[in-house]
Amino acid sequence: MTAVFIEGIAFWSPRLPGWELAAPVLRGEQAPPAALAPRPATALLPPNERRRAPDTVAIALEVAAEACADAGLTACELASVFTSTHGDLAITDYMCATLATSPDSISPIKFHNSVHNTAAGYWSIATGCMAPYIALSAWHHSFAVGMLEAITQVACDEVPVLLVAYDIEAKGALASVAPSQGLLAAALIFAPTRGERSVAQIEWNTSGDWNGEDTKPTSAVACELAGNAMVKCLSTFEALAGRSPREVRYTLGPELAL
């Protein structure tokens, strides 16, 4: 069993735009606000880039910046792991449809934003971060694999690591095979030792003797977010909001769990 410490937490969805709003809702103490928030303003980017940035970039940069602020850490010094089940399915759908009907009219900006590491690239440029980042996807295991990658780096390199997890609405034909609804993003900063701002300790291991299921989120708001491909992250954030010891299990594949 290996331990790491959480220094910063961030969360964003249209119904819960921020961890301070989300935590009591995930504890069951409050109902989620009735009004839906627009997508984040992405203050890290200049106005022109902010307008052009896709939803994936807007929500990923929002939670990444909020987690750094919560931890009191300088963004440009942090290694990071960005994980998304699908990446930007809206742009992928646009690219496929345009290539099939009018390939000469592909938007250079959308082409530029079509790669899976778009959000991580924007983050490194906006913050001037020269530390390494990883952008990954592991289908339904994306949050768990992203967390495992981040906490493994912390354990091996003994440095803080930022984890950013996000998914957006699926569009077009791809929505039938890669479904996802709404916007959801969350971020955690893991550290190797307990600090003044540590808010939780995570003891973790992997198990090969496993044929069970992921721990399911139980909060009322989980039903509203259930359609998003990153919804599995809620189990961890419910545990953090509850402020009490709790076991959370995630499958990493057919015979391995975190």
Image (spheres, grey):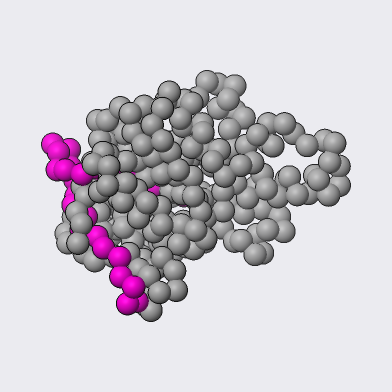
Whether residue 166 is visible to the viewer of this picture, yes or no, is: no
Quadrant, the C terminus: bottom left
* Residue at the spot 40% in from the left edge and 74% down from the top edge: 255
Q: Could you tell me residue 205's position as x and y percent?
A: 26, 63
Please indicate, yes or no, whether residue 1 appears anywhere in the rendered image.
yes
Is 5 drawn above or below residue 239 in the view shown?
above
Is 175 in front, or is 165?
Answer: 165
| Highlighted range, magenta | 184-210
Q: Is residue 78 magenta?
A: no
Q: Quadrant of residue 49?
A: top right
**Rendered location of residue 242, percent (x, y):** 22, 57
Q: Indicate the quadrant where residue 190 lies.
A: top left
Q: Residue at x 69, y 37 (%)?
A: 111
Q: In the picture provided, is 224 more to the left or to the right than 30?
A: right
**Which quarter shows the N terminus?**
bottom left
Q: Position of residue 140 (x, y in %)?
A: 49, 63
Q: Determine whether 119 is above or below 165 in the image.
A: above
Residue placed at 30% from the left, 50% from the top?
151
Tell me the quarter of the picture where residue 115 sits. Answer: top right
Pick out the residue farthest to the front. 156
Residue 206 x %, y %:
30, 65
